Image: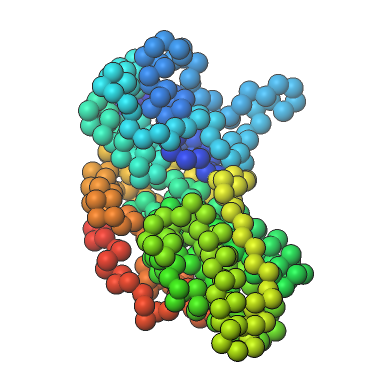
Amino acid sequence: MTSTQRIGILTSGGDCPGLNAVIRAVVKCANRRGWDVIGIPYSTAGFIEVADGKYDPDHLRLADHGYDIPGILQGLDVLQFLSGTILGSLNKGYPDGADNVAKILAGYQKLNLDALIAIGGDGSLDIIYDLAQRGGWNLIGIPKTIDNDVPFTEKSIGFNSAVQTVNSALYDLTFTAASHDRVMVVEVMGRDAGHLALHGGIAGGADVILIPELVPVLTPQVVTQICQHIAELRQRGRKFALVVVAEGVRGEDGQRQHLIGDLLATAIADRSRTLCQTGDTAYCDMDRVETRAMVLGHIQRSGIPTASDRLLAAAFGRKAIDLIAEGRYNRMVVWEAGRVRSKDLGDVIATVHDCHQRGVCPSPVEADSTMVKVARSLGIYVGDPETLPDPKAVMPEIPAIV
């Protein structure tokens, strides 16, 4: 076993359910080895504050039971149930200026850390990896994002919980939509990936799911096909519809829209009126349907972490400590085929850079994936397969996980 005794941990980028569960798992596993874990507040900004003398390093040490709660509840272990992050986070890109970079490196040295565990998405891990290379840090990355778009891993912390939130929202909206025969358009997060919209939409009983990998642009043809699909549903007795659209779907001009859900709701209503003018009574019936849009927004980043995310957090936290004990640094913990493994962070970051330069998602939904096939088999409109983009145009070449 390595003599490493002092481990730093931070959370970076957008928050999501399960971050505290990872922190808890890391601290518990480390403490059983006799190691100390130092919680870095507000990601890399915490190193700057340490360098400026705003924190006593000894006060940043984390206890394995979370909070020191007084009274009969003292020692209550609550971290695995809490959303957000007790360490705070930072989502502002690369540190501004050489002075701040120097302070970050100095803060790391002042804490006398033997290794650092960074919990973040592809952008956060990219920044921290660069800093680690500059400072000679021993770094371990743990992927987290509700978008599930970090390359090389099938699962990221927070994704399953966000899917549950989308699923719950669609369940609630089903009854108000059915009560008024409405078309409800629900916009969900995901950045440039459609994993959250696809999984949440299928689980929540959506009739239409639009994701950027299959419907990158909201063309008039797509809107017409959606109207046709909803009209067919109405003719079969389903007088309402749930439409899920990922935020990465772009407008007809190919530009990213601030509220793509609102644009789609308006487009469905307008196209229905146009189709009604053809004399087809099915579309004239559609013309009388009320269309409403809603954005789930940051509620998708909150909520109690699901059991699945808590289990993943425990497995990832334990693997991170094992990698440090083995002296295997500059690795990212990944989930593949039911097992926790690791990948060279250099390969991960190289893939992220390549994908961003080519303007493609680092880990998109595959056009022929199981969930896409499931959606089509269930009668969900996800785009006309004859007009799909070439999967090779959106899927980067990913080397094997070892």
Q: Is residue 103 visible?
A: yes
Q: Is residue 34 visible?
A: no
Q: Where 270 sits versus 53, above or below?
A: below
Q: Residue shown at 47%/40% (left/top)?
A: 14
Q: Quadrant of the N terminus?
A: top left
How many numbered marks, from 0 up? 0
- Quadrant of the rendered image containing residue 149: bottom left
In the image: residue 335, left or right of residue 243: left
- Quadrant of the rendered image containing residue 228: bottom right
Q: Residue shown at 56%/59% (left/top)?
A: 262
Q: Residue shown at 39%/44% (left/top)?
A: 121
In the image: residue 45, left or right of residue 167: left
Find residue 272 and report its horizontal and vertical position in percent.
58, 77
Q: Residue shown at 58%/40% (left/top)?
A: 83
Q: Where 196 sits versus 60, above or below?
A: below
Find residue 357 and report its horizontal and vertical position in percent.
24, 51
Find residue 181 and report its horizontal and vertical position in percent.
72, 73
Which residue is more in the foreground, 35 or 312?
Answer: 312
Q: Where 271 sits versus 185, above or below?
A: below
Q: Quadrant of the C terminus?
A: bottom left
Which residue is more in the foreground, 317 or 60?
Answer: 60
Which residue is more in the foreground, 146 or 244?
Answer: 244
In the image: residue 109, left or right of residue 65: left
Which residue is more in the foreground, 151 or 114?
Answer: 151
Find residue 47 and report its horizontal and vertical position in percent.
38, 21
Instruction: Name the residue furthest front.
Output: 277
Q: Where 361 sits versus 43, above or below?
A: below
